[in-house]
Image (cartoon, coloured by chain):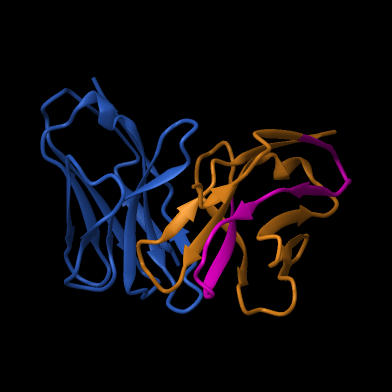
C-alpha cells in the first residue's frame, strides 16, 4: 500500500525550462492537493482538486498549472520555471469527512 | 490574522519525559478539524492525530494526545515518554468547515529530544 507517490523526488532545472511533477494515490480519496514548502513559511497551497474533473487555485497558483487526469492522478506543471519556484513540493490526498491529508514524500526542485 | 499560530520555533526535551507543543487557532466557523503532522529530517509529512470541533473528548493516538481547549482556541500536542525518534518538526493544521481549500498550517515547532 504505497499511499501517495510523487515523482521525481529531485529535479534541477534552468530558468525557463518546463517540467511536470506527477502524483498518484491508491487511497481512493476524492480530493488531492499540491503544496509548496519554503524555509520558515510552512506549507502553502498551490492548487487543489475537490474531485475528478475539477481543479481550483489555492494561495500561490501563479506560474503553475495542474491536471486531474483521473481519480488517482494529479499532476503539477511548471511551464517556465523561475528561481522563485525553488522549493519542496508536496502532493496530498484528503480523506472525506475528517479531511486529514496524506502526503507524498515530497519533490525537491531547484531552479538555477 | 494568522489562522494557526505556533509560538515555539524550537524546543528541547529529555528522553522519556513528556512535552507539550503549543498551537492556537482562529476561526469563526463552528465546524472545523485540527491536525498535527510530524516532519522528520527525511522530509515526509506524517499525520499524527485529529480532533474534530464537535468531539467531546480529547483525541489520543498512542503516545500522542491532543489537549483541546475550545474556549481558548488551543489544540496543544502532548507527547508522552519522548523518544529520540520524536526529534522532528511538528506542524499544527486546521481544516475550516468542509472547504477543500481551507486547510491551514502553522509555521512549525522543531523538537529536539536529548538522550
> Is A32 displayed left or right of B59 in the figure?
left
Seen from the viewer's position, the closer of residues B5 and B41 is: B5
Seen from the viewer's position, the closer of residues A48 and B3 is: B3
Seen from the viewer's position, the closer of residues B19 and B67 is: B67
Outermost top residue: A112
- Residue A15 occupies quadrant: top left
Q: Which residues are magenta?
A: B12-38
Number of numbered discs: 0
How far across and down, in percent of the image, does residue B93 sit? 54, 56
Q: Is residue B16 magenta?
A: yes
How far across and down, in percent of the image, does residue B66 sit? 72, 62
Q: Quadrant of the N terminus of chain A?
A: bottom left
Q: Quadrant of the C terminus of chain A?
A: top left
Which colour represents chain A? blue
Q: Is residue A98 magenta?
A: no
- Residue A67 occupies quadrant: bottom left
Amino acid at each position: 500500500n504505497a499511499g501517495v507517490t510523487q515523482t521525481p523526488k529531485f529535479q534541477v532545472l534552468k530558468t525557463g525550462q518546463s517540467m511536470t511533477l506527477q502524483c498518484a494515490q491508491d487511497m481512493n480519496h476524492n480530493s488531492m492537493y499540491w503544496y509548496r514548502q519554503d524555509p520558515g513559511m510552512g506549507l502553502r497551497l498551490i492548487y487543489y482538486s475537490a474531485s475528478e474533473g475539477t481543479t481550483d487555485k489555492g494561495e500561490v497558483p501563479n506560474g503553475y498549472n495542474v491536471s486531474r487526469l483521473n481519480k488517482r492522478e494529479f499532476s503539477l506543471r511548471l511551464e517556465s520555471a523561475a528561481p522563485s519556484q525553488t522549493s519542496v513540493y508536496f502532493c496530498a490526498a484528503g480523506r472525506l469527512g475528517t479531511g486529514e491529508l496524506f502526503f507524498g514524500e515530497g519533490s525537491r526542485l531547484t531552479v538555477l | 490574522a494568522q489562522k494557526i499560530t505556533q509560538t515555539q520555533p524550537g524546543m528541547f526535551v529529555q528522553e522519556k519525559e513528556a512535552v507539550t507543543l503549543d498551537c492556537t487557532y482562529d476561526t469563526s466557523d463552528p465546524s472545523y478539524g485540527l491536525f498535527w503532522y510530524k516532519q522528520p529530517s527525511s522530509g515526509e509529512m506524517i499525520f499524527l492525530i485529529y480532533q474534530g470541533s464537535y468531539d467531546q473528548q480529547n483525541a489520543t493516538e498512542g503516545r500522542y494526545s491532543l489537549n483541546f481547549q475550545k474556549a481558548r482556541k488551543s489544540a496543544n500536542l502532548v507527547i508522552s515518554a519522548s523518544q529520540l525518534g520524536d526529534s522532528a518538526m511538528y506542524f499544527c493544521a486546521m481544516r475550516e468547515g468542509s472547504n477543500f481549500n481551507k486547510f491551514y498550517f502553522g509555521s512549525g515547532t522543531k523538537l529536539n529530544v536529548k538522550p
